[in-house]
Amino acid sequence: MKFLLASLCLAASLIVSGSGEITIAPVFSDHAVLQRDKPLPVWGRAEPGASVSVTFGAVSVSGTAGRDGRWVVKLPALAADSQPRTLTVSDGRDTVSVGDLLVGEVWLCSGQSNMQWPVKNTDNAAAEVAAAADPLLRLLNVPRVTSNVPSEDPGAKWELCTPLTVAEFSGVGYYFARELRRALGVPVGMMNASWGGTAAEPWISQALFRDHPNPKLARLHQWRAQAVRDTVEADRELLAECARQQAAWGEKFAVFLAANAGLPPPADDWKPLTVPAGNIEDTFGQRADGSYLVRKIFRLDRAPAGEVTLRLGAVRDFDITWLNGTRVGATVTISEPDPRETPRNVPRRYVVPAGVLRAGDNELLIRVFSYSGFCGLGQQEQARNIGLAAADGEEIPLAGAGWECRLEHNIGFCPPDFSVNRQAHAGMIRDGMIAPLAPYAMRGALWYQGEGNTRSAGDYREVLGLLIGDWRAAWGDDFSFYIAQLANYLARREQPADSDWARLREAQWQTALTVKDTGLAVLIDLGVANDIHPRNKQEVGRRLALIALARDYGRDIEYRGPAFSDMKIAGNRATLSFTHTGGGLASHGADGELRGFAIAGADRKFYWAKAVINGDTVTVSADEVPSPVAVRYAWADNPAADLYNADGLPASPFRTDDWARE
C-alpha cells in the first residue's frame, strides 16, 4: 500500500504546472544514444510561458513551455556520430545538460519473461557476459512498475554496456543490439521494458478498451477503473487475509512434514511419468498443493566404486530424495523471500555415498513438495544430464520414460504472496513503463510476449493490433515493430490435436502479415518441452536482427523462413507453395524426413501426412484421407517441425483451414 500511495503522489506531481526550474525528461541522461536520420523530439518542464532553447553540437532550436509547464522541441535529423556530445537546455536563467551522448540506432525491447530473461541466464552466459564490454552500445533498463496515470520518469538512466550492466539486461535485447553493432558499425541504444508473467492488455492504454465492440475487451476498462477505486482498501484487506491463509497453510505443512520427514511407506497406486516433467500435476488432472512421490527403479550390472553424484535438475518446488532407502539430499522450506534465490531454481546435485548403489535393482524415490500452482522435476537441465555420474566418468542416464508418480498428500490451496495484481489491469504497465519513454525517437520495437494470452488466443490478433497502434500513436511515428513468435513448449503429442499455443502463434503470424511495417521471427525450433524459458536467446536476437537488417537497413539477405502462400488439391494430394525459400526448401529431419504436416478431409479429422519437397512446393498426402480439404503444419504446443529454407530459417506454423476450435 505504501508503494501504491507513493506512486500516486509521484504521478500527481508530474502533471501539475512547472515549478519554474527547467528540467529535461528523465529518459535523456548521460550516455544516451539519439536516433539518427529522424527528427528528434526533446521535452521537459519549465515555468509556464518560458522560452526554452535546446542545443546539441552545432544545432540549436527553441520553443515555449505551455500552461502546464511542458515544453517540446524537435532537433533536425542527424547523421550517425560516435563522437560524444552534450545536450544543453536553457530558459535564459537556468541551464541543464546531459553529456556523453552519441547518435546511432535506438530500439525498444518489451514483453514478458522471455524478453525479460537476462543475459546471465542464457546459453554460455559466463563467456557472453565477460565479452560484453562495448562503449558504443548503451543500455536503458526500465524497472518493473505500474501507474494509474502516465508516468514521465522511467526510473532508470542510460548505461554503457559492460559485463556488470549487461548481466541483468534482456538477453534478446542485448543479442539483437550486438548483431546491429557488428553489421552497422554505428552506436546502438537498447531500451528494455519487460515484465515476466504479464498479458498484453496491461501494456495497452486503458482508453482503447472503453466501449470496445468486443465485449471481453470492453470489460477490461471496467475492471481497471474498479481496481483503481478499490486498490487501497483491497490492499489492506487482501494482505491481511493472505497472511491468515498463508499462516494456516504453513501450519498444516509443518504438521505434515513433522509426521512425514522419513522414508514413505510402500504404495501401489503409481501412475507413469516421463522425466523431465514440466508439471507433475498434469498427470492427475488437478491442482494440489502438498506432496507427490516420484520414483524410478533402474537396474545396474555392477555397483559403481566410490561416491556418485545424482543430477536431478531443478525440482519445483522442494524435495527430499532417497536412493535405496538412504536419504541423499533435501531442500525443504516454505519461505520465499526472493524467488530468484529459492532452491527450486537450482539444479540438484546430491552426493550418493559409496555402497548405496548396488548391482541389480535400485530405487530412486523423491518426495516433491508443491505450493506454487504446479510442480516439476528435471527442469532447467538437458535431459541427457539427468542421472548418475561416477567418479571414474561412468554415466548412468535416468531421463525418459520408466518413472512413476503418485499424489501423497493434498494440503490444499496455498494463497499467492501478493495482494492486488496491479500488473494485470489494462494500461497499468503501459502508463508506468512505456509512457515515460514516448516520444523518444527510435527505429523500432521488439515484442516477445504471448505466453500470458494463450488462454485467450482467439482475441490476441485484435489485442496485438491495439498495442501496436497505441504505441505508434504515443510516439507519433509508425516505427518498425518485430514480433518473436512463441517457441515450442510442453509435451509432444503422438497424434494431431488442436492447440491454444498454435492459435496464438497464428495470431502473431497474421499480425505480421496484415499490419504495416511489422515482421515475425519464427522460434518453433528453439524451445524446450519442460522449460518455458529456452536459453538460446542468441539465436532469437539474431533472427530479429535479420529482419531489421533487411527491412530497415536495406541489406540483401533472407530474413525469414518459408512462408505458406497457396494450396492446390489434385486427387488425394495437396500441393503447398511457399515464398521466402531462400534458394530452395529443405528438411532438417533425420534422413531427410519431413515431419509436422497433418491433413484432413471434410470430416475435419487430421492425420499425420507424408510430405515431400519439390522445389518451392511441398506435396502432402495420407492414406486415411482420400479427398483432402485442409493441411496444418507444426500445429501443436511442441510440434515436430522440419521445414526450413536454404538459409537455415524455419517455416512458421500455419493452417489452410479456418475451423474454430472444437
Image (spheres, grey):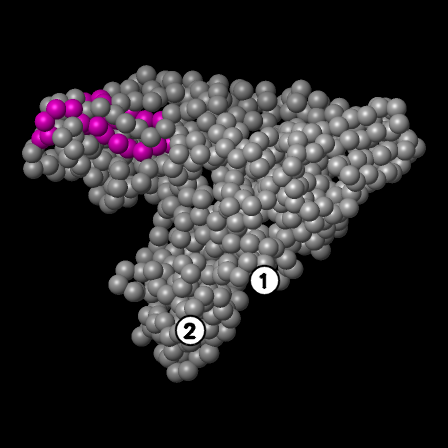
Q: Against 476, is 293 above or below? A: above
Q: Please name whichever residue, 183 or 652, is drawn nearer the observer in this view of the structure.
A: 183
- Hey, which quadrant is residue 499 in on the image? bottom left
| Three-letter amino acid code of the residue under disc 2 | Thr
Task: Name the residue rendered at 17%, 37% in the picture.
Answer: 396
Q: Against 253, is 107 above or below? A: below
Q: Please name whichever residue, 277 or 293, is drawn nearer the observer in this view of the structure.
A: 277
456 sits left or right of 10 in the view: left
Q: Earlier in the sequence, mark 1 or mark 2?
A: 1
Residue 452 at x, y percent in the picture: 53, 44
Q: Please name whichever residue, 286 or 346, is drawn nearer the observer in this view of the structure.
A: 346
Q: Is residue 281 visible?
A: no
Q: Is residue 182 visible?
A: yes
- Hey, which quadrant is residue 241 in on the image? top right
Q: Residues within 10 Å of mark 2 (few under 14, many from 20)?
A: many
Q: Please name whichever residue, 417 or 380, is drawn nearer the observer in this view of the structure.
A: 380
Q: Residues within 10 Å of mark 1 (few under 14, many from 20)?
A: few
Q: Residue at the bottom extreme?
A: 571
Magenta stretch, residue numbers: 303-328
Secondary structure mostly taken by the magenta-highlighted segment of the chain: strand
Residue 645, numbered label: none
| Three-letter amino acid code of the residue under disc 1 | Leu
Determine the secondary structure under disc 1.
Answer: helix
> Label 1 belongs to which residue?
513
Task: Name the residue rendered at 42%, 56% in the picture.
Answer: 636
Q: Against 157, is 205 above or below? A: below
Determine the secondary structure under disc 2.
Answer: strand
Task: Name the residue rendered at 44%, 79% in the picture.
Answer: 569
Residue 604 at x, y percent in the picture: 44, 69
Residue 92 at x, y percent in the picture: 89, 27
